[in-house]
Image: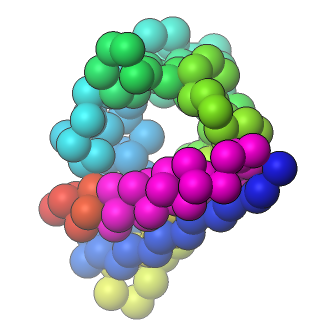
Amino acid sequence: MAKYKVEVAQEYRQPVETVFRKLSDHNGLGRVLGIPVKRVVDGRSDVNGVGSVRRMGLWPVTVEETVVAVVPNQSIDYRISKGGAPLKNHSGALAFSQTPQGSRVVWTINFDSSLPIVGAVVKQVLTQGLRLGLKRIK
């Protein structure tokens, strides 16, 4: 099974708290990514926190992602918990840091695919989608 990694970084003139708030809000994430996103399960202590689940995409091609770890204004880790075939072991991490001019986000996605052509295409689509999406944050 081939392993794939996507990594996209974006810098902002906004403070890390503002960028974190925009990227941690499941129901607002659709405006960033340009696809439907809806929180379908609230997190344990924060609606968008650990244990929360968001549904992304349009039927019949939807996935659900579950947030597995959050450190406010520092990181968000998630994994696909439903859908996503033929991809396996799909996980994502957002790392936030303060910069002299504002803030920086690095979004990393790792996944496996037994179909190399599909894996390569998905990697390109995710990379382009994240680059465009992260540039939408104002």
Task: For residue 8, say whether it is visible.
Answer: yes
Q: Is residue 3 above or below residue 34?
A: below
Q: Position of residue 106 (x, y in %)?
A: 52, 68
Q: Residue at x 28, y 56 (%)?
A: 133
Furthest toward the right, the residue is 1
Q: Residue at x 26, y 27 (%)?
A: 36
Q: How is the image coloured?
A: rainbow
Q: Is residue 124 magenta?
A: yes
Furthest toward the bottom, the residue is 100
Quadrant where the C terminus sits is: bottom left
Q: Which residues are magenta?
A: 108-131
Q: Position of residue 117 (x, y in %)?
A: 58, 55
Task: For residue 15, say whether it is visible.
Answer: no
Q: Is residue 78 above or below residue 23?
A: above
Residue 102 falls in image quadrant: bottom left
Q: Is residue 29 magenta?
A: no
Residue 84 falls in image quadrant: top right
Q: How many marks?
A: 0
Q: Position of residue 31 (x, y in %)?
A: 20, 40
**Closer-to-camera residue (101/82):** 82
Q: Residue at x 40, y 56 (%)?
A: 125
Residue 78 falls in image quadrant: top right
Q: Residue at x 33, y 14 (%)?
A: 59
Give the main secondary structure, helix, strand or loop, of the magenta stretch: helix
**Closer-to-camera residue (44/117):** 117
Q: Position of residue 55 (x, y in %)?
A: 43, 20
**Closer-to-camera residue (132/95):** 132
Q: Is residue 44 above or below residue 116?
A: above
